[in-house]
Amino acid sequence: MIDICLLGTGGMMPLPQRWLTSLMVRYNGRSILLDCGEGTQIAMKKRGWSPNPIDLMLFTHYHADHISGLPGMLLSMGNAERTEPLLMVGPKGLQKVVESLRVIAPELPFEIRYRELSEDQETFDLPGEKDFHITAYRVNHRVPCYCYNFVLDRASPSGQGFRRARP
């Protein structure tokens, strides 16, 4: 089963009950956080979710309303005793942006791994899952920006597995 939750949809400014951009995708015990705007931790806590099991963070671009919640999220993950490496994927410059934000979160008990996107289209799998595929597409914005397409393989009615055609 796949679970998708819009954690934040507040645009450029947080509102009392509407946080900045973020989306959680959960599948088969794994979690993907797409963008991490201010208030993402609060929205997750309201749903009773911990930041610890996030396996993958995807970033569309580096405007503040899409990434300003990251330092606090990383600190919360560390305080939740996370030790497993965290994979982050985003446009070129991801490592530089994240390391700059980590000035206020310099010590973490886990490694951050980076995958910087540079092609018009790149496909990869959700770590640990062979039937959940993610394709990043470059889109037009004022800064380098990607959108993400999630594809989950399904079994055919005959019980034989098949891969859904990618767009």
Image (tube, rainbow, N blue to C red):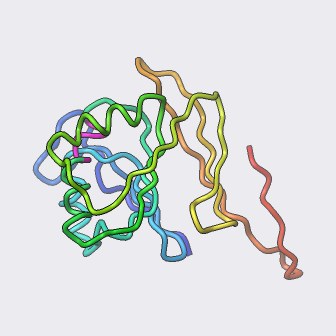
Residue 96's spot in the image, x, y percent?
35, 31
Residue 28's spot in the image, x, y percent?
54, 76
Q: Is residue 138 left or right of residue 143?
A: right
Q: Quadrant of the N terminus?
A: bottom right
Which quadrant of the view contains residue 110?
bottom left
Number of labels in the image equals 0
Look at the magenta stretch and give its main secondary structure.
helix
Q: What span is colored magenta in the figure?
A: 65-70
Q: Residue at x 24, y 64 (%)?
A: 78
Q: Is residue 90 above or below residue 24?
A: above
Q: Could you say which is closer to the camera, residue 85 or residue 24? A: 85
Which quadrant of the view contains residue 23?
bottom left
**Is residue 69 one of those drawn in magenta?**
yes
Q: Quadrant of the C terminus?
A: top right
Q: Residue at x 47, y 38 (%)?
A: 90
Residue 88's spot in the image, x, y percent?
44, 48
Q: Is residue 67 left or right of residue 2?
A: left
Q: Residue at x 61, y 51 (%)?
A: 134
Outermost residue to the bottom = 159
Q: Residue at x 52, y 38 (%)?
A: 147
Q: Could you say which is closer to the camera, residue 141 or residue 88? A: 88
Q: Is residue 160 above or below residue 73?
A: below
**Is residue 19 one of those drawn in magenta?**
no
Q: Is residue 7 left or right of residue 160?
A: left
